[in-house]
Image (cartoon, grey):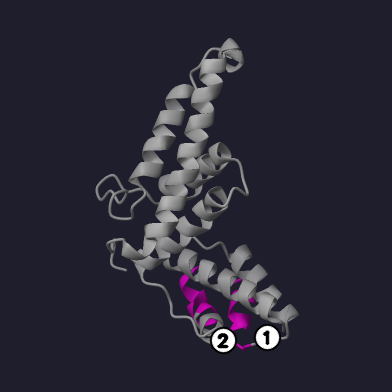
Amino acid sequence: MNAVADASLAGEALFAAARFRLKSLPQKDCRELIDAMMYQDIWYDEFLLVLDPQLPWPDGAAPAIEKTLQHFALPMPHLDEAYRILIERLLRPIAEGRIDPIGGLSDFMDRFFWEYRDPENPFGESLGIDKVVKLHYQLDDWHSYQPGLLSDPAFAQQLSTLKVDIVRAAQAWLDGRSQLTGVDRKGG
């Protein structure tokens, strides 16, 4: 296996492990990861567990996930690290300019914030995403605009500024993620 493929699979394994830790890894996605590993001639007997239709999901997949991580010399992420891995996966394309900031922010909110939000135990500030979330609410306020507003140069400038702010917030999170305080929710 070449170094690029190995690094890519290791990244996918860590992402899968984070989702597994958060109990949000679909069996289909786990199977796709194992298929990719088998395509690279990586095989462990524990992979058979994931193919078993009677498998209690997701807990029954733990041996396969653990073996996958061992292969890449990666630890199973703790709960707070699992959150960070997911946040990074969703914010990096915004920060690097690979996707539209507004679409990326909406995706972040749908795939992370709304998915894992717990009103009893908010985590925005502890994970450093509070600025990103505030920008979502600012954008959400603008979704009630009048149809002719898009042609207004002042509105277009505000929207452009908001996009820059979204990119900067994503970049700031990536730059500061190693200094974040830990959050351990629900026994992780």
Q: Quadrant of the C terminus?
A: bottom left
Q: Secondary structure at mark 2?
A: helix
Q: Residue at x 71, y 82 (%)?
A: 2
Q: Which residues are magenta?
A: 44-65
The image shows residue 124, relative to residue 157, as above or below, that is: below
Identity of the residue furthest to the left in this view: 120
Measured Cα–Cα span from mark 2 to mark 1:
9 Å
Q: Residue at x 54, y 30 (%)?
A: 160
Is residue 61 magenta-colored? yes
The image shows residue 147, relative to residue 120, as above or below, that is: above
Q: Position of residue 96 (x, y in %)?
A: 57, 52
Q: Position of residue 58 (x, y in %)?
A: 49, 68
Q: Residue at x 65, y 75 (%)?
A: 34
Label 2 vs 1, first from the N-terminus: 1
Q: Nearer the viewer, residue 171 or 120?
A: 171
Q: Secondary structure at mark 1?
A: loop
Dot 2 amino acid type? His
- Would residue 48 be seen by someone viewing this image from the given angle? yes
Left or right of 151, for residue 121: left
Q: Residue at x 58, y 85 (%)?
A: 46
Q: For mark 1, what is the residue?
A: 42
- Would residue 55 be seen by someone viewing this image from the given angle? no
Q: For mark 2, what is the residue?
A: 71
Q: Quadrant of the N terminus?
A: bottom right
- Is there CB contact under 8 Å for labels 2 and 1? yes
Is residue 64 magenta-colored? yes
The image shows residue 42, relative to residue 141, as above or below, that is: below
Q: Nearer the viewer, residue 161 or 113?
A: 161
Left or right of 179, for residue 12: right
When asked about the image quadrant of residue 131, the answer is: top left
